[in-house]
Image (cartoon, rainbow, N blue to C red):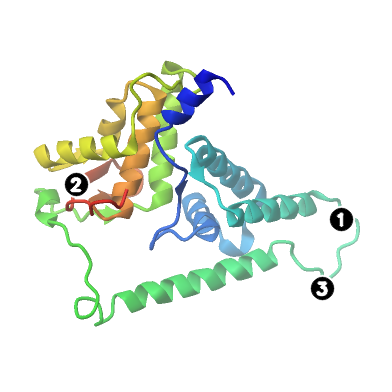
């Protein structure tokens, strides 16, 4: 191990970031997001399309050094297996032959049922009595047309980042180069919060456009993910596909990053 390797290790800006919060619970959530995004019937999932998009997300998460835990890889393997089974020739069709997607569909529906039930329970009377959530000033977003903004889920945020990066990837080298002055998530968090204290609402892409390198871009995105996880920022948009807005929601807890 040479001196350059030691220097790169010392300048590493972050540990792998685990994608799991109270709202985004893993691979089944990602599958449901893709089904909704593609506007397909959950009982008739186009496995080839969904598998390709699912793997694209995993590759992006790996590139960003987001920790892809085993359950994501297990679902990826299952999708690939189902895809291969559906591609096999079927000279004789048995009436009682099971659809290779049936078990996955059953799990998705069961997961969706429990997730919806959990969301319904959260909204009951206990919220505000025994449990309190961080609120944000909706007046910041009120327009002349009184447009109601909705929270942005994790996968939509990752998707927007991916599209932004693809448009500008030619501006940076393929590999992250560790410079003498490294960029840490802690520094970037402080920078993001500083900007939000000056300007109440900032567009998501506005943060990304100011990045000077791939390393800067990745660390900025990870800092935003961490701030969202800790509920220090609010991430909203008017509707799916519209610009994502970020606002300040409170100070971070010391020592949590």
Using a 10 Å C-alpha cutoff, classify the residue at mark 3 as few (fewer than 14 neighbours), some (14 to 19) or many (20 or more).
few
Q: Which is more foreground, mark 2 or mark 1?
A: 2
Report x, y in % for residue 223.
Answer: 32, 41
Q: Residue at x 60, y 69 (%)?
A: 107
Cα distance, mark 2 to mark 1?
Answer: 54 Å
Judged from the image, the secondary structure of the residue bearing numbered disc 2 is strand
Q: Which residue is mark 1?
A: 90
Q: Helix, strand or loop at disc 1?
A: loop
Q: Give yes or no for contact between labels 3 and 2 (Cβ–Cβ under 8 Å).
A: no
Query: Which residue is nearer to you in this view: 35 or 187?
Result: 187
Q: Of marks 3 and 2, which one's residue comes earlier in the chain?
A: 3
Front disc: 3 or 2: 2
Q: Which quadrant does the N terminus fall into?
A: top right
Identified at 41% across, 17% down, the residue is: 171
Q: Earlier in the sequence, mark 1 or mark 3?
A: 1
- Residue that protrudes farthest toward the right in the picture: 91
Name the spot of residue 167 as percent of width and height, x first.
42, 25
Q: Which residue is mark 3?
A: 96
Q: Earlier in the sequence, mark 2 or mark 1?
A: 1
Viewer-nearest residue: 32 or 11: 11
At a point 44% along the width and 35% down the height, the residue shown is 162
Up-down relation of residue 106 to residue 198 (above or below): below
Question: Label 3's element?
Answer: loop
Seen from the viewer's position, the closer of residues 179 and 174 is 179
Residue 58 figure quarter: top right
Asked if residue 100 can be seen in this view, the reply is yes
**Residue 247 got which mark?**
2
The picture places residue 232, in percent across and down from the top left corner, at 23, 52
- Badge 1 density bin: few <14, some 14–19, many ≥20, Cα 10 Å: few
């Amino acid at each position: 191990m040479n001196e350059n390797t030691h220097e790169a290790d010392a300048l590493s800006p972050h540990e792998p970031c685990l994608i799991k919060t109270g709202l985004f619970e893993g691979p089944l959530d990602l599958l449901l997001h893709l089904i909704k995004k593609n506007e397909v019937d959950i009982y008739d999932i186009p496995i080839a399309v969904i598998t390709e998009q699912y793997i694209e997300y995993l590759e992006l998460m790996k590139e960003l050094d987001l920790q892809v835990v085993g359950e994501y890889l297990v679902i990826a393997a299952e999708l690939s297996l189902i895809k291969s089974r559906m591609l096999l020739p079927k000279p004789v069709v048995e009436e009682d032959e099971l659809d290779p997607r049936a078990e996955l569909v059953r799990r998705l529906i069961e997961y969706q049922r429990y997730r919806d039930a959990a969301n319904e329970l959260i909204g009951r009377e206990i919220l505000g009595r025994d449990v309190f959530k961080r609120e944000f000033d909706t007046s910041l977003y009120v327009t002349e047309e009184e447009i109601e903004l909705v929270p942005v889920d994790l996968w939509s945020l990752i998707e927007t980042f991916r599209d932004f990066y693809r448009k500008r990837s030619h501006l940076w080298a393929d590999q992250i180069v560790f410079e003498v002055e490294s960029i840490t998530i802690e520094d970037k968090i402080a920078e993001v919060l500083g900007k939000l204290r000056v300007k109440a609402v900032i567009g998501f892409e506005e943060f990304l456009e100011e990045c000077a390198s791939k390393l800067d871009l990745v660390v900025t995105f990870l800092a935003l993910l961490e701030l969202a996880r800790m509920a220090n920022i609010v991430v909203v948009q008017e509707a799916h596909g519209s610009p994502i807005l970020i606002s300040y929601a409170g100070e971070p807890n010391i020592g949590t990053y």
